[in-house]
Amino acid sequence: MNWHEYAIKHGKLPEWPYEISYGKENVVESDVLVVGGGVAGCRAAIAALQQGASVAVAERGFTKRSGLGGAGVDHWHGAVTNPCSKITPEMYSDTAMKISDGYTNGLARYIIGKEGWDTLLELEEMGVQIRDEDDEFKDTMFRDEETKLLFAYDLDNKHCLRVYGNNIKPCLDAEMRRLGAGVYDRTCITALLTEGGRQGARVIGAMGVNDRTGEFFVFKAKAVVVATGGGKRLGSFAPELTESQSMFHINLTNMGHTIAWNAGAELVMMDQLYVGGLDMGYAPYSMGNADNTYQGAPTVDANGVRVQHASATGTLLTDERQIFQSANPDTFVIGHGIGLGPTNTQEYSVSTLDHALNDKISSGELRLPLYNDFTLLDEKHRRLIWGLMLSHEGKTRVPIYETLSKWGFDPDKDMLQYAVTNAELLSHRSSWTGLEHSPKNWVVTAGGGGIITDWRLQGSLPGMFAAGGFPLFGSGCHGEAQTTGRYAGRQAARFASEHDSAEPDRAQIEREKRELFAPVENEGGDIGWKELNYAIARVVQDYCGRYKTEEILDLGIKRLKDLRDTEGRRTYANNPHELGRLVECFRLIDLGICYMEAAKARKASSKILGFSRVDYPEMDPPEWNCLLPISQSDGQVHVRKLPCDYYRQAPYSDCLAENYEKYTVPAKKEAT
Amino acid sequence: MNEAYLVPNPIAPNQSVCIDHDKCVGCNCCANACRTQTIMPNPEKGQPPIVIYPDECWFCGCCVGACKREAIRIVYPINQRVFFKRKTTGEVFRLGGPDSPPQTYFKPPVG
């Protein structure tokens, strides 16, 4: 029953089902506060609890299942120290940096390489299966007979594992609660608390609102881990059309970036902005393809003619094993979907379909539509894709594995149709995503931008740590998020043990409350959150899109501020849900300004960053090959230049292992 | 039939998940598992929840997994209903189409 049906049936509006108490103040104190209860946040909480810290977790949704990894996962990247792997943490980090021209997080990628496997082993102890224990895939090329591990993408180097990750989030949630975490679900964190309420000072907690009750929360903590998800509502917003087909859900507003920015922390790579939509496609994994979870699935044309696989550099492949090898024997497949964006070489990428697919379709040699023909696989390999990967990946167990089966699809008999679109896209990525239906000027803000940290994963503000694929700049996907979460949680606990708590500034709290609850008291309000969000997205699309100049960016910043100060003051919220969404919109305005300030700071264009300036068209001039940490205080924006490999320059050692050994906090199993 | 009311336009998708009112006991496990408040409890206790914000549904299926009575299922938006072809017969079916074949794939998830 939806709203219309209820209203028509009952002749009245459904009452809000929870008791509302707008602005009622709740104070929660802990050693460590974790903002965001996804996989990174849960790992941070568990690790901090294991170190003996008391922990509170503030989560926008419901920790048992929320977060981008909440519905499950099928791959674990970066487990490079597993007993079968031929890749070292140094190779993993250095290669990520090399193929990204330095625009990724070499420091975090080293930590991921160093601890990814340990992080997964701990997960196994919590009840997540990571091996072929029933020997279902015995004698296949994907399995190591001794460890029973199953590999993906690169069968020579064996550093990416297939995992049975459907129950990861319930296991993490249960462990976190068992160890005593205080979990605050349905809490939209809107600001960090800083010492004296000053931008740029030590972080001592956070504030937020509950989207069921409208109650206000003040979290006081000695250390804070920012472990929020990514975002998309800033530039590409059309939920009625895109929610079902997106890898990013509507709660994702880059809130961690924004609260860090507003607290005065330094962010980098906020100038990595892709123009072009990701969302106007089909439900993730619902259509045929030969990519990602479907790697190795055979593809045929409308007449059943086989489409060949090709190496990442275009060599046609004749043997099935070659699909899971790198393009040349001196390289390795670094991973896929791990936040590396476009790279300067294909040599470390996964295999694709025939690079001449477009020509062959144009000439009539191959006919659309294409299909995945799973019947061409032997039963074990078919089960590996359909029964393991698709039944464990997030967003596929119920939406694909169960739902398609219920509607009669049978991979033992049926062929799954590809999207009908530009074959150049089809040969290189998942057929359900992007397509050619997205508005040309949509801006995707899910680049690698985020909080810059030291070797402790501590940001530029004392007491604020960053973890996860998004708030921590350039740092990857699911396994990476868990690994950096676990590392940052230990660091936050150590920091908390060495520092006293600080009393929050009352004026900062009152300011936040006034702003937060204004829309529920605004009786003349006539603008809802959605219209405001569309307006914000339009400004970002137009003024931070393809045609950026100094003047255009200044105009964009002005228009966002205008929105906040004019239409923003006419907004209303009918209930705590709308209030939560509206507060997110106000923070999106702050975030848009951050992106535009970062775009103003880079006076050059850049290929890897997907960044274009009409007034500075030169691509990647050497003097601009650097990170540009950006922060704000007292109404001023501050930018500096920083080498991309800052983490191996003074005061650090050039040796990654030495830095790691110096700064890491050893893991503990149980709370002391 | 000749009665009408002034109501807002229908939202799209109309109903991202469908709750079977015969099976549902109104326990609200699905509403609790929903990350976005797409599903909210019915104000009347024990009654099936309401799909209040279907435009916010991520189609993650966590509500389906949380339901102990198999009372809830995903409803793909019509523009998302993909096609498949039976290899032996050449028949083409649409997800949710009028002539969908009966379920034949019952193999449980690996692990």
Image (cartoon, grey):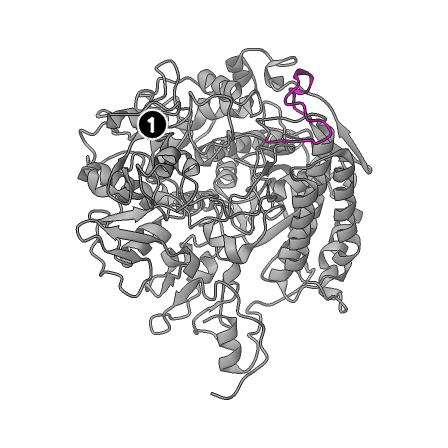
Q: Is residue A300 above or below residue B14?
A: above
- Amino acid type at circle 1 is Ala
- Residue furthest out toward the top: A654
Can you give x and y, in whole percent of width and height, for residue A335 in the image? 42, 28
Q: Is residue A125 visible?
A: no
Query: What range is drawn magenta here?
Result: A610-627
In the rendered view, tell whether residue A269 sits above or below residue B60.
above
Figure label count: 1
Query: Is the residue marked by circle 1 packed among few (<14), some (14-19), or many (20+) residues within 10 Å?
Result: many
Q: Work out which residue is located at the far bottom of the displayed protein and give it.
A: B2
Check if residue B44 falls in the magenta segment. no
Name the image quarter holding the N terminus of chain A: bottom left
Horizontal relation, residue A22 to residue A136: left or right: right
Label 1: chain letter: A
Query: What element does badge 1 sit on?
Result: strand
Viewer-proximal residue, A84 or A428? A428
Question: Is A333 above or below relative to A558?
Answer: above
State left or right for residue A519 relative to residue A278: right
Q: Residue A162, can we see it?
A: yes
**Which secondary structure dominates the residues rendered in magenta?**
loop
Q: Hey, which quadrant is residue A199 in on the image?
A: top right
Please state the horizontal and vertical placement of residue B98, each as a whole percent of the image: 30, 66
Residue A481 position, x and y percent, is 49, 35
Which residue in the structure is indicated by mark 1?
A: A310
Is residue A615 located in the magenta-colored stretch of the structure?
A: yes
The reply, left or right, for residue A446 in relation to residue A380 is right
Q: Position of residue A81 (x, y in %)?
A: 38, 21
> Residue A56 appears in which quarter of the rendering?
top right
